[in-house]
Amino acid sequence: MRQMVAWMAIMLVAAIFSAYMLYHSEREAKRLLTTKEAGGTKNLSPDDPSAVARIRRRLIVFYAVGIAICVLVDLKLFMALMELWSRIQVEEQRKALVTTEETRSGGSEAGSGAEATLPATLNNEAQVPPSKQLPPGSQKRTGQADTPMVLVPGGTFWMGISDDERDRVIEDCTMELKKQAVSCKGWVLSAQPRHQVTLDPFALDPYEVTNRQFQQFVLTTGYHTTAEKEGTAFVWANSQQGWQKTKGATWRQPEAGLDVFASDRTDHPVVNVSWYDAEAYCGWAGKRLPTEAEFEYATRAGTQTVYWWGNFLSSPRRVANVADESARTHLPVIMAGYDDGAITTAPVGSYEANPFGLFDMTGNVSEWTADRYDSLYYRKSPERNPTGPSSGDYRMIRGGGWSDASYKIRSTIRGGGAPTERDTKIGFRCAQDRPK
């Protein structure tokens, strides 16, 4: 919106200047038709063809110069404005969304060219404390409504992205999206400045809300989701077509085809739910959506690495459901060498828990949080228990999902979407204040 207002202001200035040039040209014409030409001995007359021709030539040159000046001034002001916005992080809201609104107009952010891959390095992993590690196969896949919540200890942590990590993210973004670095820079700067945040203890669902749980809510309340009321949701088609607005796609039929309960997806995370749907469910369950700060704190789980498991994605361990070898023919960008065994969503709890005992904080589905979205919020965020800006049209989405790779699954990455947005990559989990 601010871009549009500024651009209109610049165009108004250019229009005023052009009008002045025209007015001045008309005055020049009148002067030439009523005065003596330099060195001449007779008055110019409109009936004199040569005089009229000379006047026209002068007007054309004079007006062309004026227009050229307008264009140059207009262009220079616009470029200066764009450079300023690049530095202060003010970009169009749609460009800032991790949910890649751009792809939904008919194509992937990575383009429709050759498949891109990013390396998955196998070393430099952070060590999970032995007391927090779970033996292979012990992850409980559950979608029961009475699943105990995890008490997340309060504490202070560094929220946001450092300058060094920012540069790496811009490099990954440029490679993945095949865009100029300035576009990626404007997008990633919303996660700066890095700042300290202190949180009180809170409780968080260990798993993303499942289809089984959401069905209990719907059957009890008769609730109708945004997708059901509006008749559409966004579904990932393939690498060439990207996100497609699909009639009949709902939480129960994510691809407008098979029912989740008829296709063994009872304990998969519920998708095609809007922010309003997520908020309604959590309210019904006596809970709330987590704040953005709570989500990042819980995702990091006491670590300072790029991901909670380390700085790289290692193949032998299945730590997250992201864009991987399983989806090589389905997605335009994958983490080469990593295979999580799932093309889209997977049952909750299928991958390792982080040190706090939370599953799928990275990957499987991106998740709604309570906060509104503001690309400049980190500049003014309170140090203790921030809850996001007081106004704004968008809501925060965190965590990355099954279709994301590289920079999009980092613990620090922010994104947002309209509260009515729904697609097959967005779900949620609920939080709760610590009981007094």
Image: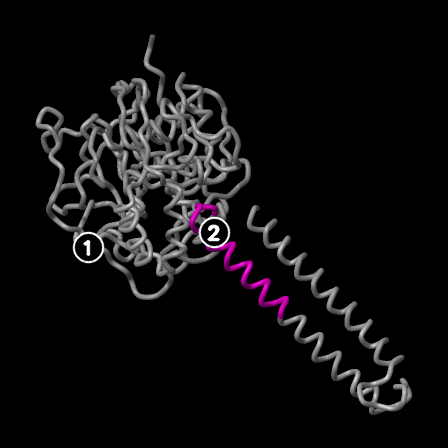
Q: What quarter of the picture does the C terminus occupy?
A: top left
Image location of residue 98, percent across then percent down:
39, 45
The residue that appears at 37% across and 63% down in the rendered structure is 112
Viewer-proximal residue, 166 or 257?
Answer: 166
Q: Is residue 72 magenta?
A: yes
Spatial distance from mark 1 to mark 2, Cα to Cα? Answer: 34 Å
Magenta segment, principal secondary structure?
A: helix
The residue that appears at 27% across and 49% down in the rendered structure is 406
Measured along the vertical axis of the image, is residue 186 above or below residue 132?
Answer: below
Q: How is the image coloured?
A: one colour
Q: Is residue 147 magenta?
A: no
Quarter occupied by residue 26: bottom right
Quarter occupied by residue 238: bottom left
Q: Is residue 346 left or right of residue 211?
A: left
Q: Is residue 232 left or right of residue 124?
A: right
Quarter occupied by residue 434: top left
As helix, strand or loop, the secondary structure at mark 2 comes to: helix
Residue type (three-letter) at the residue carrying disc 1 = Pro
The range drawn in magenta is 69-90
State the residue position of label 2. Answer: 84
Mark identifier at residue 119: 1
